[in-house]
């Protein structure tokens, strides 16, 4: 249903009378703030994915494991599962962060490259597939399960992963796709 | 020259359509294929939304049986394989005193996929047969299952962590079973089914809804 865009006071949002979808915000996030968040997230994501999350002491051996390891180990046995895990936990959050770094940098430096159109389209698709928060809850579930089998020690990768999740969620809550399209279309 | 739109009346009745990518509206007659602003494919409603949703829901419905009946993981301990289905995993968690975790896994792995299929099928039927149910309540149900649907991926992530941790060859290792792939198909198809369903169809089907 068509809604009239109202003049709303600061701190308020306008929602569709039918579906409650927010279609207008009084405050728009500054691109440099989103750029800073996205850049920090991009830097943190490298150790979050590569550094060990947890060490496990089992059968007299202590071994470390990171986020990528399990998914890569499943490629031969269950490629579909492996692909979905890699996509939702690694590819989508990283790609989303790269897209937001690019679009916010374009806004910040007042550039409108031809690639921005595709980046904004990709952002609106990939934003639904970033599932870091689900991964972290899954990690907690796995840790609870594992405590009955072996001794566990948390490693630096976990702290980076939590940091990446916080930055990622803040970035998504601040990001406004409509604002970026307005900028690209010079409105 | 675009005519000013009248608030309170649907855009389709005023000959306009909304692009789901750039959120700009354009004339239905002048732009039948692509959005004039961003170039994305455009249509007043998602093309073949009902058909896509039904096809994906049927796929999910078929795969939910192997996902729940076959082993989702195998524990290899001293050369012996111990299969675990979703349900037996929950029972073993309960018997180990981890009722909270068992509850989370039960909700994410059994309740959510079934609930999602049932709710989406119900809303699709309501749209198809133009059942005059409260559209707002239908939308709330859709939003709820759409939001909780992503939490079904939890079980897949847990499997990937367990596979990485238990990797001691024949002594002790975990690897995914056939149900893991079936469960992945259920999760992905229900996520796509929700995405392909156009919620505006709920209001289109309710003739006297505001």
Image (spheres, coloured by chain):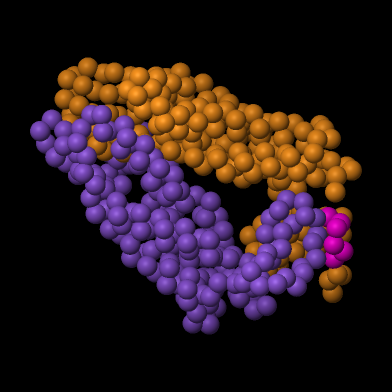
Chain colours: A purple, B orange
* Residue B6 is a magenta residue: yes
Q: Quadrant of the N terminus of chain B?
A: bottom right
x and y percentages locating residue B200 in the rendered image: 75, 48
Residue drawn 35% across and 34% down?
B159
* Residue A165 is a magenta residue: no
x and y percentages locating residue B46 in the rendered image: 70, 48
Residue drawn 64% across and 69% down?
A11
Residue B202 shows in the view: no
Residue drawn 51% across and 60% down?
A172
x and y percentages locating residue B160 in the rendered image: 33, 38
Given the current orientation, which residue lies at the most extreme left position?
A: A60
x and y percentages locating residue A184 in the rendered image: 60, 74
In the image, B49: left or right of A3? left
Rendered position, B191 above or below A95: above
Which of the pair A154/A31 is nearer the observer? A154
Given the current orientation, which residue lies at the most extreme bottom position?
A: A110
Given the current orientation, which residue lies at the most extreme right position?
A: B208
Which of the pair B156/B94 is nearer the observer? B94
Rendered position, A127 above or below A177: above
Residue drawn 77% across and 64% down?
B26
Rendered position, B99 above or below B203: above
Residue A60 shows in the view: yes
Q: How many marks?
A: 0
- Residue B143 occupies quadrant: top right
Which of the pair A86/B166 is nearer the observer? B166
In the image, A160: left or right of B181? left
Q: What residue range appears in magenta? A: B5-10
Magenta span dominant secondary structure? loop
């Amino acid at each position: 249903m068509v809604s009239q865009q109202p003049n709303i006071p600061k701190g308020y949002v306008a929602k569709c009378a039918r579906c409650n979808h927010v279609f207008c915000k009084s405050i728009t996030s500054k691109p440099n703030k989103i750029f800073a968040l996205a850049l920090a997230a991009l830097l943190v994501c490298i150790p979050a994915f590569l550094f060990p999350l947890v060490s496990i002491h089992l059968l007299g051996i202590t071994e470390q494991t990171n986020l990528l390891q399990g998914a890569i180990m499943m490629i031969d046995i269950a490629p579909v599962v492996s692909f979905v895990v890699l996509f939702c936990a690694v590819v989508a959050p990283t790609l989303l962060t790269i897209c937001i770094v690019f679009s916010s940098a374009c806004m910040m430096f007042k550039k409108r490259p031809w690639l921005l159109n595709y980046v904004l389209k990709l952002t609106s698709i990939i934003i639904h597939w970033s599932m870091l928060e689900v991964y972290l809850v899954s990690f907690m579930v796995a840790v609870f399960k594992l405590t009955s089998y072996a001794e566990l020690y948390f490693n630096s990768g976990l702290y980076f992963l939590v940091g990446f999740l916080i930055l990622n969620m803040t970035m998504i809550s601040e990001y406004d796709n409509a604002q970026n399209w307005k900028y690209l279309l010079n409105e | 020259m675009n005519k000013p739109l009248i608030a309170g009346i649907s855009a389709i009745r005023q000959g306009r359509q909304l692009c789901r990518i750039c959120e700009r509206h354009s004339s239905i007659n002048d732009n039948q294929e692509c959005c004039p602003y961003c170039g994305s494919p455009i249509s007043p409603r998602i093309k073949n939304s009902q058909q896509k949703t039904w096809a994906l829901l049927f796929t999910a419905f078929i795969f939910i049986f192997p996902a729940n009946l076959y082993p989702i993981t195998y524990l290899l301990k001293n050369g012996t394989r111990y299969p675990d289905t979703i349900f037996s995993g929950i029972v073993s968690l309960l018997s180990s005193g981890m009722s909270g975790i068992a509850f989370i896994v039960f909700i994410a792995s059994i309740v959510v996929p079934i609930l999602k299929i049932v709710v989406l099928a119900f809303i699709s039927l309501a749209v198809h047969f133009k059942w005059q149910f409260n559209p707002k309540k239908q939308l709330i149900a859709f939003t709820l299952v759409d939001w909780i649907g992503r939490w079904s991926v939890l079980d897949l992530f847990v499997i990937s962590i367990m596979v990485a941790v238990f990797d001691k060859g024949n002594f002790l290792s975990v690897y995914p079973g056939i149900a893991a792939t079936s469960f992945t198909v259920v999760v992905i198809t229900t996520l796509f089914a929700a995405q392909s369903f156009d919620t505006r169809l709920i209001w289109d089907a309710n003739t006297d809804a505001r």
